[in-house]
Amino acid sequence: MRKGNESQPSYTAPMRRLTGTDRLCVALDQGLRTLLLPARTERPRPQADVPDEPLDADAQRESAALMRVNHVGEVCAQALYSAQSLTTRNPSLREHLEHAAQEEEDHLNWTASRICELDGRTSLLNPLWWGGAFGIGLMAGLAGDKWSLGFVVETERQVEAHLVSHLERLPRGDQSSRAIVAQMATDEAAHAQAARAAGAAELPTPIKTLMTLAAKVMTTTAHRI
């Protein structure tokens, strides 16, 4: 008979490796969280060095619209990175993509909170943006890791340029939005650099052009809807 003070042997069940179907379910779950729940953040929201100036109604609407566009970009980023993580078989690359996605989730949180402060709203078409970006991410991932990374480089390059343009378009008195956008631009440049270092291939010019046109459609539509 075992004595009462003897400890029972511990048993830890071995962890089952995730299958492709498992990973797809995880990606879709993440998509629902992106669209329906407040984004998690690991970093505090950037703060301006100087206080905001009062915004008139037109300036406030413009700030809210620009931040809505930036929020849509982060919804798309979550979908893209999720799809690319799903398709790669390289654990190191998957970890790289997941890390970048976490920083993009910070951006998602920051832009959403600023939109709320501006009495604006996020895009009504967010499910459409997420679905389209997820499909594009799948195609990029299935083309191979070096092309998937090349897609990251070009996407982040275009996003960084887009954010820099927003620093010019945002009302001068909206220092809170400008602080957020400036940090986002810095992060996007770092993501592109990391992807280059990981072995990204240079995308063909026609692909870059198509990406630019698709981004133009998204930003123009999201500014209004």
Image (cartoon, rainbow, N blue to C red):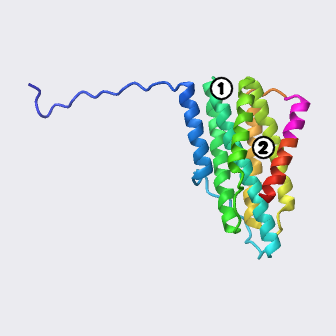
Q: Which of the two residues, 23 or 184, is positioned nearer the viewer here?
A: 23
Q: Position of residue 93 (x, y in %)?
A: 66, 29
Residue identifier under label 2: 189
Relative side of 35 to 167, left or right:
left
Task: Name the residue located 71 percent from the left edge and 25 percent from the top edge.
Answer: 142
Where is 166 relative to 216, above or below?
Answer: below
Between circles 1 and 2, the one closer to the viewer is 1
Quadrant for the C terminus, please: bottom right
Q: Position of residue 80 (x, y in %)?
A: 70, 38
Q: Position of residue 204 (x, y in %)?
A: 88, 28
Residue identifier under label 1: 88
Q: How many marks?
A: 2
Q: Amino acid at mark 2?
A: Ala
Q: Secondary structure at mark 1?
A: loop
The image quadrant of residue 87 is top right
Task: Name the residue located 66 percent from the left edge and 65 percent from the top edge.
Answer: 116
What is the crowding at mark 1: few (fewer than 14 residues within 10 Å), some, or many (at least 20)?
Answer: some
Q: Amino acid at mark 1?
A: Thr
Relative side of 38 to 118, left or right:
left
> Predominant secondary structure in magenta?
helix
Task: Name the residue located 84 percent from the left edge and 42 percent from the top edge.
Answer: 214
What is the crowding at mark 2: few (fewer than 14 residues within 10 Å), some, or many (at least 20)?
Answer: some
Q: Which of the two residues, 163 or 60, is positioned nearer the viewer here?
A: 60
Bounds of the magenta span? 203-212
Asked whether the viewer can see residue 79, the reply is yes
Q: Is residue 214 magenta?
A: no
Q: Position of residue 122 (x, y in %)?
A: 70, 58
